[in-house]
Structures are given as C-alpha cells and as structure tokens.
C-alpha cells in the first residue's frame, strides 16, 4: 500500500505536503528479513502506471526481489497517516482498495510454479483475508501449494476489525481456522484466541490467559511455533513490549522492554521477522524471543513502517545499555 | 478531487513527498469568481473522515461557501500529477473514483430547494457526465431545476476521452445534447462540435471551422453565449492562447497572448470564470474576451490548479506591458 | 496576528525558513468552537494587501466566517516563535503592531448593528486591552452593545505583562474592572485577582487562594461563571493541567492531567472554548470542566496555536486511556 | 531589512513557509564588494532581540564586518516577496518600518569618529532618504563627515515612489541635491534627472536623453563618476541590460546583455558594486562598465537579493560564451 | 558517486540542505537500460558502512542488480553540484576519491568468473581510466576477459581533463588506445580523435571533421559502432543536440533537437543507453540514432543524473510534437 | 568539518536530503565564547573552492573571526550524522579526511607571529592529535609559541578511539603528555587518566576515582585547572550531567542536571566554553562549574553541534525552574 503521512505531527487538514512511502505487512517482513541477510521475494500485483512504477522502485530500494510482483490492473491501496502524540492517538484513513490491482488479481497472474520451487518460507497476513473472497481463495491455494512443496507457512493473525465490518469475527473464523491448519509458524496472542476462535478462559490476567490458550491453539491446529507480544502504552510517548514464543511445548518470555516511541507502525512486523530469523537460524528460544522483541523495540525508533536494522544492529543494542553517539 | 503533485519536476518514482491540494473544474471556477467578488457555493459530497475534513478546509481557504457540500460516503477521487518540462509532457494518474462520495451520492443528499433559491448561475462540467448514470441524472435534474427557477446554466464541455473509454463520443453525445439544450452559456470549441456532436465542416483552418460551427451550435441548442480558446504549445515551456466568444450572433476574438507556462492545469477554468464575470458585469464583448484570456494567461503563472487573481490583478496586467517588481 | 515559527526547534538565528500561520486568542477560540459545530465570526480589521489576503484565507480555512472582518489600513501584527525544548523555554519576539490595521481601526469600521443582531455570545481577550486607548474604548463599547442586545459577554483576562509595560497592573486595573462588570463568563485564576485587581489572601496554597478569591470576584462583578486552569511544568517536556469552574456558587475541579507537550501556545484558548461549549450545551459542571481540560490537553499535541479537535475527538480521549493507532 | 519570500512562485495566500533572508541596498553593495576582496562595514542599527541577532548572523555570513552595527530599539523592517513569473510581476509588501531601530536611531548611536577614520568609500542609498527627517539628517551629516575626512562618497539615487508618497519628487528634490553635491560617485540614469531634478530634454530616445543629461548633472553637482543601466523586460522571463558610465567627461556603454532571470532583486546593487570595484582598482572605463554589467547580469541568476560572485567568477563569464558544466 | 546538490539554484555557500543521490556513468547507463527492459548489473565496490548501505539501496531503487557490487573499504567519492542558470554555468566540486573503496579495490574482489558468464555486453567509461594505475589495469583485464568470453565491450571515451591533470592527453593516450582496441561499441566524437589520439584533419567544420575522423578511428581500432553527439548551448537555458552513429561504414545523423534544459548531467549516458538498446534490439541506424538522441533530450527534463524513461516514453515523444498534459 | 545530517531521525539509507553545517570542537568552543562576548579566532585551513567558501561563510555566521583561516589544498573532512532515538544510538560515518586542507597544511601556512600576539587563550583538542605526525607537530609548536608569548593554553583531551586505531592509547600517550605539560586549563575526566596516561586507582566508584586521579594529574603536569563532566544516559531520551572543576587544589561539583536531549553533539564544547568564560571572568568555582554545566545542558536543546546561548540565556535558566513561553 501507499502510505501518505502528514509531516511533523500535523493533521491532514493542516498539511500541505505528504510523505510518500510504500509498505504493508508483507513488505515489512520481507524487507526486515532481507536486512538480516535473507533473500526475500514479494508476491503481489501492482498497477501498470506511474503509481505502480513508484511502488516497484520503492520495494527494490528496500532490497526486495520483485520478479514475482506482476503488473496490471489500475489501482493501489492508499492510506493516510496522521501520527499521534501524547494523548492524541495516531489516525489512519484508508482510500478505496476494493478495486486495487492486488484485490482484482487472479490466481493465473502469479507464477505459482516457480514461487513454490524457489522459497523455503512463505508469510501470510490476516489483513489479506479481509479483502474479498477471491483473495482469500488465492491465499489458501498458495499456502497449500507451498506446504505441499515442502515449504513452511507463516501466518500472522493481524485481525483488523474495521476491515471485516459487522459480525467480523464470525465472518473471519472459518478462514482463520484454515490458515491456522496450514501454518507452521503463527503470530498471535490470547486475544485472537478469544475473539476469532471463540476460545474461553477462566483466568483474568493476560499472561495467565496466554499461557492457557496458546498451547491449546498450537495443539488444536498442529502449529510448530506461536509467537507474539503484549504491549502497554504509557502517557509519555513511551511503550512497553514483552515478547513470547511457544515452541516445543514450552513458553518463553522476553524481558519487558520500555522505550520512547517515534513510529509505532511496523513494529509488529519487526518482531515477526525476528522470530522467523531466530527460528531459521536455530537460535535458542531465549535468544530468539529477545532478538525479536529487541527488533520490535528498535522499529519504534525508525522512521516509516518498514524495519531497517541489520542483525548486527540488533545484537549491538541487545548487548548494550542505552547508547551514546557511535563515532 | 485531491491533487497530489510531485515536487520540483520529479517523477512519481523519484518523489518522497507530494504536495496536496484539492481542486476540480467546479472548485476552480467558483473560487476564481469568489476572487472577483462574487459569492460562490459548491454543490458536492465529501467523505466524513479526515480526508473530507481536509478537503473542506481547503475549499474554505479558497473562499468557497460550503453549506451545500454534504458529508458522507467513504472516498474522494485522487489524482497524481507529474509536471512536464520542455519536451516531456505532464502526466496525470488517477486513483479509483468510482466509489467516491460524490459518485455514490444520491439526489436526496443535496438541498436542491435552497440551492435553486439562492443562486443566479450554476456551472456544470462535462467531466461530471463521464462518471456514472446516477451522476448524469443528478446533473440534468439540477440543471433543469435551476433553469426553471430562473437561474442561468453554464456548461463546460470538457470532454475527457480517457474517462469515457471506447466509443466514448457515441456514449457521450446524448448527455451533451441534453446539457447544451439546458445551457445558457457554453464553453467549447470547434473540436467538440466535430467529435461529440458529429458536425462537419468544409474548412481546413481551425479559425474558419470555428466561425462556421459555433454559430450553428448556438442556433441549434439555443445558447446565448459560447466561448472558448485555441491553444498552441511551443517547445520552450511557452504557450499561446487566443480566446473567442460568440454572443448575439457576433464572434469576438482576443489578441493571441504568448507567455511562459508554470502550471497549465486550471487555466481553462480561469478563462471560463473571466467569461462569466464579464457576462455578469455586462462588459463589452471585446473587454470580456480580453479579460478572460488574460485571466487564462495569468493562471499559467500561478502554482496549483485554482486561479488566484483578483479583477484588479487582471486589469493591471491587461493595461501593462510585461512588468518588473511592484514595490 | 501572523505567527512565524522557526522549524525543528531552531533558533531564529539558525533558521532559513519560517512556518507562517495566523492566530490570536479570538481566532483560536472561534475556530475551536467552529470545530464543535458552532457558527463563529471574527470581528477584526485586516490590511488591504497580500498579507491581509493571506490572513483572510487562513481564517476561512479554520472555518471562521469573515463577513465582519473589514479590510483597510496597512499592517498586521507579527510574532516570531522559537519553540523551546526541555530546559530551554519557548521565546516570542513581537514586531511593531501599534500601527496595525486593527489597532488603528475605528468604531465606524465595524458593522456593529448586524454583529449584535447575529451573535449569542461574544468573546474578548485582555491582550486587546493592552493595545491603545482607542481599541480599549471599542472593546468596551462593543461589549456593552452586545450585552444590551441580550448577548452574553465572555472575557479572558489574559494579562500580558510585556505589553502593559511599567506599572502595568495599575494602568490595566480600571479597564479590567469595566470588562469584568460587563462579562457573564470570565477566564482567569487567583493570580489575576492578586495582581490586577489587588485582592489579598491569607492562604499560601494556590488552590486555597483560588477557592477564596474567585467567589469574591464573581460576587463583586456579578459574573455568572469563572473558569481557568492551574498549570505545572515538568523538566521532561511534559505539563500538568487542572481545570476549575465556578458556577452557581460552586467550585468544580477537573482531574489533574499530565501529558507530553508538543505546542503549548493556544492551549488556554482550547480550554476556554471547552468551557463555552459546555456552558452553551448545558453540560454538567463536572462534564464541562473535564471536557475543557481535555480540550486544553489535546491542544498541546496539535501543531500551531489553533485547536483542531472536534467534540467527538475530545469525548473519545476522555473516555479512553492513552491510545494506540486508530485504524 | 528582513526579506520573507514565498517558495516556488507561490502567492502569499498560498504559502505555508517563507524563506527568510536579510538584505538592503547597503547590505548588497557591501557584501558584493567583500566578495571582490574588499573589507566592508555596515553602519546601521538592529534591535536587541532574536530578530536583531538573526540579522547580525546573516550579515556576518555575507562577510560584512559588524562592529559599526549598533544594537538597540525594538524593530526591523520586513518585506514580503512574491516572485513573479512570465506575465505576472513580482510583488513586494512592506511591514511597518517607521519605528524600526534604524529609523529611530540617533546620530549619537553611531561611532562616527572611528567610521570616518577607517573607511575609504561610503555608500548611501536614496531609499534611506525616504525614511524620516532624522534619518535624512544623519545621512547628510555622515556623508559630510566622511568627505571632510578625505573619503569618497557614493550615492545611489534609487528613488522609490511608494515611500515618498504624494508629491514625492518635490519633497525629495532638496535632499537629493544635497547628496549629489556631496557625492563623488553617483548611480542614476536620465529618469532621475527628469523626475527628481526636474531637468528637461529635447530628445525622445532614452540613449540620447541620457547622453545629454548625465554630463549636465555631473557638471552641475561636480560629480566625478555617474553610472547606471537601461533595462528592457521581455515576456519570456528574460531581461536585457546595458550599462553606462560617465567619467572624465566621457560616456562609455557596455554591450547589451540579454539573459534569463531567476531573481531580479539586488541586480542593480551588483552593478553598483562592479562600478565601485572597477573605479577603485583603476580598471579602464570599458572594462569597468563591462565588469559591472556582467556582475548585474549574473546577479539575476543568483538566489536572493545579495550578489554572490567573486571577481574571478565575473571575469570567467565575461571571457566565455554561455557555459556548460564546470567539472 | 554520491551527488550532493544544492536546492533551488542556490550556491553551496547559500545552502543549508543538500539533495543526495548516487550516480556515475555506469550507474546511469545500466539503470537506463533497465528501464528499457534489460537486466543490468553494476560491477563496483562500496564501503561497508552507512554510506555504502545508502548507495546500495539507491542502486536497487534504480533497478540495478547488485550481486556484483562488493562491499569493503572505507570511502565513496562525493561531488557537490551547484546547478547553473542562464549565463551562470553549473559547478561541480569533488571530494577526495583517491582512497575510495572502488579505487582501492583489487581484482580479486570481483567475481570475474561469474560476471563474464552472465553478461552479454559490458560498458566502461573513460573517467574510470583517470583514477589510478590499479584501476586502469582492472578495467583492461575485465574488458579482455569479457571479450574472450564472447561478450561485447562498450567504451565511452568521456575524457575529463581535470582528472588527468597536466599533460593529460599524453598520459591517457596509451590506455585509451588499449580500450579502443578491445571495444566493439565506442562513444566519442571528433574532439576525442584530435586531442586524445592526436589525429589531424584538414576540415574546419565540426561535421566534416567528424565524417573524416570517425571512420578512420573505426578502421584503425576495428570498432563495430561509433556514436556520439554534437551539442550547442544557447543563452536561454536551452540546448541543441545532434546525434550520430557510424556503423557498417555508414554515418547516420539524427535531426537536431532543441529543447529547454532542466538537468544536463547524465544526458550523454541517456544517449549511450539509447544506442546500446537500438543496437541490441536491431533497430535500423536511423531509428537507433533518433531513439538515442531523443533519450538524450528527455534526460535534460529529468531531475538528477540518471535517465528515467521507458522505451514507451521515448517512442511517445518521438512520434509527437510538443505535448500537453496526458490525462 | 562539514556535518551532513539526515533529517527527522531518518537513516542515511532512507534520506534524500541532508542538512549541511560546519563544526568541530574548535569551531564550537570559539563560537560559544563569541556568544559570551569574547572576540574569537579560528586557526585552520580550508580548501580554495566552493566547499571552502561555504565553510568560511558558515564560520562567519557563527561570529568567528576568519583572518587566520588560510585557504588552499583541496578537501575538507565530512561526517554523516544519523541522530539516534530512544534505544537506537546516534551514528557517525566519516569520509576520508587524511588529505584535507588542514591535515596537509604546513606550519608556514599559518601567521603564527600575529596569532600569538593577538590572543590571550588558545584551545586545542585531542582529536587534532589523532590526525597525522605533521599536524601533531604543528599543534605542539603553536601551543609552545602561545605559552612563550604569555598566553594560556587550553587542552581538551577528547580521545577518539576510532581515529587512533589499534594500540591507540599507546600511540597517543606521548603526545597527550606533551600537551598536558603545556596546558594551563585541561578538559578531561578520570577515564582519560586511566586509559591514556595509564594511571591506576584503588577506588571503584567513578567519583572517588575522579577525586583521586585528577589532583594527581594536575600536580604531575602542573596544570592550573582541570574540568570535565560525568554523564548518565537514560532510556527516555534524557541524560544527566554533573560538572566538576579542580582549581587551586580544590574540587568543585555542580548539581546533577537531568534533562531531555535533542542534539547531544557539541554539549561537551558548551561545557568547555562555560569553564573558560568563568575562569576568564573570575567567577567563583561554584558559579563557574554551575554556569558551564548549565551551558552544557542547554546545548542539548539546541539544533546542531555549535552552542548558541548567550551569558544572559544561561543565567536566566540557572536562576529559574523549568520555563514556560517567554512573551
């Protein structure tokens, strides 16, 4: 999607210029993994006009391979971002993306044969499921194809209420269950278990709920790894983040990190990329979840949606206390 | 519509910031007339979100009264503008506006009763006719209502081929004829007579064609005044403009003005506003067409789509040769 | 006034660009009320040149009706703002506004007859009293006329020491007393009671002083409602704000809100607009003072002097704890 | 003065940012001479606040020595510049400078004793004469003192009609005559001779008028050197400039240079500085007037009021035809 | 190299911000060919730090494959660009690039084995020959290896006097002769034949000299194709360009194109890319040289060094007269 | 050096514009002292090109006298700054400065005779010692000359590990000892005593180590005054600073100040300038160290490397608690 952000904390009605970038959960995760040294592709469809050209250049700049980005159709989804400050929350306004090239794309547009040959892991995001029936079908077909070809499937629940509309949870449940059944790695927390899957808990503390429900989800859908975060938002432009990962029937938590927030969007994707990297590299659970949570933390200090840090940067910050100028 | 322009002659794929403004033929004409001291309203529909809020603030800034701008629906049309230079033409890329608040608006949304009471003249643009059947119907209903209430109807042909698609002229003809029948003042030139109305001419020179066809159009549809321009584009970022006006069976031409071009979009609307102003104020035909053509010329030196000059500014430039600093 | 702000925390001697906006207590209060759905006018005088044109466009953008803004004279007051950070306070430098169009305006310039017919409430600011004798006279005449016509008069003490010069309190007292006698709603706190009105107190705590003096002021000048805030400034770019309102012989305090500060100027006007809105809408005292204090708080997160929030925005933040992205 | 310019050809009512610089005829001439290797001082008065601080830093940046710039008073003159394009002329809007630090400065403020000791040439501008009686007196006193101390006096007529108001020529004549009597070098052309000095001519061609009147002026007021330019303004953002110089009873003209114009303000001061430099260095009349006219031409390609070119830059362009990239 | 350009025609001493991009003859040619649909690689070395990271992202954005860009060493060459206007030429100031990663790179750094396998054509630029002995050796080794592996070698003479210093032509001759012997396609004109190769001509007209010398060069060094341009620079920010190509013993000229110039740097590389594209695609000589010259012309209307046009864009402009807005 | 900073917390690979300024320890200290009313010179060498011109203009803007800044050579050191946020540290990337004009300057370039006559105090920075043998020799020669002429020598240890490379402390020790022997005032803390001078301590607390080692250093090298700071870095973009000064065998500490940080670079130089100013003016030790630490604190709220506060500004903040808007 194209992100159009007002500069310097302005509201849209105050702004005369907008900062243009391109992002999305898939873009963010793939680009973050590219920064860790992986070879990352995007599977998508962009319009064959100046907007599509701009998006493609931007993806290339992020280090993403674009041979599976097909071109055609007319539109690209756009969202406007007014960054919050203190007590004023950030606000996102979407334009019409129902007729975007991606949403109107057809299965035949994509070179599935080569995609499944070339990749080891594929990442899907729950937002995509909210688009339309055709896209949902494509997602499930592609996930199935990758799985059959021996690849791993990653699924980030990322339920976005405003996109599903009324009775959203009910509409979404079936598709989420399909994706969970196909997925090897899942990004979610206990709230997804309640609201999407309709699970129940006797606990009232979030952590207890999490420790009860996540193992159940893993067992029910035969998921190898489930990870996610708990976030606390403070009044002074700072947040706290605690990462968790459930792997081989054992739950691991990171330290709770508290930090000043510059740009919150995309930090969840940074966490996801950290989990995938740790999993792929065979880091210990402790190291994986610490790495991922630190990746999430740093993403809050980076301008824009897309994480920008290398493995070196993250280890550096994990090993240090708060840093001064590096010169 | 929202105009998102790349700064400093960049292509969209080079840009990181976009300059946001709001415009459209209606906006431009009404705002230009406001600068001439008239009281101008816009009849439209804007989404009830941050984008609509920004658009409304912008219209207010331009001096447009917004009480007949209703709020509702979800989207606003957007276009991207890459300004040309020398041999490289300007390029416009549209986003999806089929589902814009305006295009999905219904007749009941608008306070027709008060609109027709309050206004003397109403201006319609041919671009609107290209939207959808519902909008076309609204346009014709509103024009009819204004006419019946004793107001004057202005219609700017403004045929935009890319919006009508294949066989566009054929599709458009019927609606254009209806609007021409309702209109008192019309903005067009001989090309509209050929291509939309299917008229023929034995002449090969543009001026001869014009002088043959425009009186025929005026007679056929009982139009009080027809005006328009002939434009020549030179290689050195300069254009020439010749205005004409057909009124009371007599054709009047302006001098041909040649000038450097900074922002070409909206200059036709500046011409239109000059014609309306001259007509309304009872200027002589010579003065009206000179005023309108000068208004059109100055608009090429103004940043953005919307004309910004006062009556004083235009008379000042009409009366002078090229000017130095005014201090 | 024109506000010229250095960008990005620069000092004026470091700056090469200035951000231009237009504001003032009256502008801020009227615009804020417009955002709450009221119909707001400004009564002022702007120069008949490009600067006045720019100011008028800006007021329109803010949603302010400008039919009572007359044009004439030569100048507009300007101030330069260097925003502070941490231990460094913000700094304001004024240009000469003694000969501004407003300060040299005459009573006859204003369409008093229609103004008093059209408005329900009129707001005056103590800063205006500091201008010159002529302006002071106009203020008192207009307040008297509105009162006689059955409108409510709001007066914000807003004593600005640098404008009154030496022995300022003494010079100002008489005028303040006149305005207090005319006013129905007054914005002030106990410090105004000491310093301008010369009242005394036996208490040493601010809150005690307030609770002693404000009722006395209300009784003495027959004021229906007095409201104001106590502000605490912390070292980490955060402030605390406690609102109070004295109405029907009862004092109501808001919770003390603590929040990060982005742009402090205009927050008092946001509070004022909240009080007026609550009063006008008949909110309970508790709700009014909470609404106003929240309006004041949010204004610290908004770029520029002028409050930008709707009633919905403020209720949203009152009802929530600190918020994440709204998408 | 502070120059506040709208960016990118915007009108003031379209602008949100202004580009701040500081200039004035004196600033421009002294800075230009500094670029030619001279040691240049400004004699002026700046307010003792952030605005004065910013102005002083800016003068220093231009290479001007500031030890004779005294500090005090409250204000600095400001002007807004909207750059023209094509047929739209540039527009300047002044703020109130009657009460500026300089205009309210007194003779005692300036360290005349040291000024006259240290300088060889002093430059005065006719704009200064338009300020007020006190300033006029100071100018004449200082010019007299410098002359008595053996320095040369340069006077640039620079009559600005809008500052002298009605019957301006009549009001100005006496002061101009005094300055002409004191001056060794004068910048003017035949129009100043007509309108200020009331001279008459039988010729109708500008060049003939010039050749008749300038020698008369030189004889009448005993002026060593008179120089100036004739400017022609074309429609395509280009101007033509012809320089002349009358020295030792002989008139010398430069070639007529035609060139694209980016920023016209300050180009006259560049010409002046070229004449002073040639005179001081003992260039031949031909070389002096060619150097000065080229300096004037290049100034049109430089951003801002103040000339920026070195002697080397100017000789380089004199010796070449139009240039490509220098790398 | 990193290009740091002052904005808006400022001189470096006026600028506070610089626009950063990355370019170079190789970058420009490869990126231009990528826009024509080719798969293009860069062979270079970038520092392993934030500057190298930024350069790599930028190359990716331009569509260049970076697998043969090795990382190491400490520096990257930088140049400052002050764009000229009218009579003022553009000015380039270099920083020290003697110790850049590329200049200190060693043959072993590059994966020659795979490079020669993967590519069909390789492009070298004469600027590279001016660096140091080690780089010259690498260039010749790589050209030889590609030629032996069956690839075509392209050589652009691009003699830069300031880099070769005193007696530059003499120093350069030997290396140029080696490259010409290895090259299949050469970019040069008759001036290179005189000054570098020391050839002589009896003609005085440039075109005659060209037609005499270029066939001699082609014969002497056994070059398949030689192409280049003649450029004329006019005073009004416009240039004229005439392309030529010598292929199969026949010389073909393009029409002379005259056009307004926005950014001249990189236009030669656009011409080169057009020749390579025409050659590779088997266009007729007429079409090739017209395509290349048009590509060169459009590059003058594009911001930055690097050509941005697609094959479609260029054909569009070849087929049209000067264009209006495309919408 | 030229500082090129990415705007708005961007990484270099995200940036398209860089903010250019010029700074360095010497520049910062001299400019800060100029703000306190002293007359300050820089002794350095700048290239004779556009970059040197820009640097010179910038120094002049900062109020620095440039008559001892000689011109010649080709290059100026450049560094890129990516400002940190929260947990992400700031990052500095240097370009090649080995061949900078300053580093290749020779003793004969500088007008030592006049320098030592004109100055009372001279300041040297340890960074300079890291450059090359020639520069080290020049530094020691100049310090010796100033000392012999009766001036005071100030030395700021400022050991920069990345510049000295491997075994840096060992390489540096000899030069540091020479400078310490020549210095009257020294900026350092206990860490310099350990690592450069190889001293040992039995204490484990920083403050105890300081109180043990600094007096020893003062005694050993016969230093009149030693001052420095202890800094603590917190996670929320705030730092704490405690200044100390050892003078006449007595150690004085400031209060520990805690404050929000906007731009950390140059704050040490602000502290240094405060110590020099207090020493020069004869402030009491308490006042000097409070003044210097406050100067250091405010520098964190100032954009750019170079301190900008006047003596008045600093006393104002010392005397107040955290401030509101000054208007």
Image (cartoon, coloured by chain):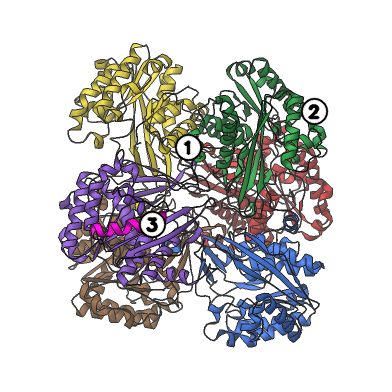
Chain colours: A purple, B yellow, C green, D red, E brown, F blue
Q: Which mark is residue C174?
A: 2
The chain that hosts pointer 1 is D
Binning the other alpha carbons within 10 Å of mark 2 as few (below 14), some (14 to 19) or many (20 upward) gives few
Q: Residues within 10 Å of mark 3 (few under 14, many from 20)?
A: many
- Front in this rendered view, residue D173 or C266: C266
Q: State the extent of the magenta-drawn residues as a range.
A: A197-223
Give the CA separation, mark 1 to mark 2: 56 Å
Q: Which residue is mark 3?
A: A268
In the drawing, what numbered circle is on residue D87? 1
Q: Are marks 3 and 2 on the same chain?
A: no
Q: Position of residue E102 (x, y in %)?
A: 39, 76
Residue E18 appears left or right of B11: right
Q: Are marks 1 and 3 in contact (CB under 8 Å)?
A: no
Percent x, y of residue A184: 25, 62
Q: Quadrant of the N terminus of chain E?
A: bottom left
Q: For the residues carrying marks 3 and 2, which lies nearer the camera in this image?
A: 3
* Front disc: 1 or 2: 2
| Number of numbered discs overlaid on the protein picture | 3
Residue with the most extreme front position: A202
Q: Is residue C318 visible?
A: yes
Q: Taking B221 as reference, is A324 above or below it? A: below
Residue E224 painted magenta: no
Q: How many angstroms separate mark 3 from mark 2 (CA)?
A: 62 Å
Q: Nearer the viewer, residue A90 or F218?
A: A90
Helix, strand or loop under label 3: helix
């Amino acid at each position: 999607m194209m992100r159009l952000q007002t500069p310097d904390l302005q509201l849209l009605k105050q702004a005369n210029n907008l900062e243009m970038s391109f992002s999305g959960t898939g873009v963010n995760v793939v680009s973050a993994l590219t920064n860790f040294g992986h070879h990352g592709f995007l599977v998508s469809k962009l319009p064959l006009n100046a907007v599509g050209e701009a998006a493609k250049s931007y993806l290339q700049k992020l280090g993403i391979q674009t041979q599976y980005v097909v071109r055609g159709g007319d539109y690209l989804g756009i969202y406007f971002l007014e960054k919050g400050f203190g007590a004023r929350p950030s606000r996102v306004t979407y334009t019409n993306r129902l007729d975007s090239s991606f949403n109107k794309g057809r299965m035949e547009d994509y070179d599935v044969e080569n995609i499944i040959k070339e990749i080891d892991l594929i990442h899907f995001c729950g937002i995509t499921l909210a688009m339309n029936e055709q896209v949902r079908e494509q997602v499930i077909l592609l996930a199935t194809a990758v799985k059959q070809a021996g690849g791993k499937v990653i699924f980030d629940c990322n339920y976005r209420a405003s996109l599903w509309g009324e009775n959203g949870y009910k509409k979404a449940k079936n598709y989420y269950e399909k994706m969970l059944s196909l997925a090897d790695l899942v990004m979610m927390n206990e709230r997804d278990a309640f609201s999407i899957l309709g699970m129940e808990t006797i606990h009232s503390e979030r952590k207890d709920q999490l420790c009860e429900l996540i193992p159940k989800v893993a067992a029910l859908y035969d998921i190898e790894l489930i990870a996610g975060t708990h976030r606390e938002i403070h009044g002074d432009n700072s947040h706290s983040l605690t990462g968790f990962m459930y792997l081989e029937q054992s739950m691991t938590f990171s330290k709770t990190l508290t930090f000043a927030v510059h740009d919150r969007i995309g930090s969840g994707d940074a966490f996801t990329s950290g989990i995938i990297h740790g999993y792929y590299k065979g880091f210990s659970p402790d190291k994986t979840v610490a790495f991922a949570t630190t990746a999430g933390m740093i993403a809050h200090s980076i301008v824009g949606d897309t994480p920008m840090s290398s493995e070196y940067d993250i280890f550096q910050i994990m090993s240090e206390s708060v840093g001064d100028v590096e010169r």
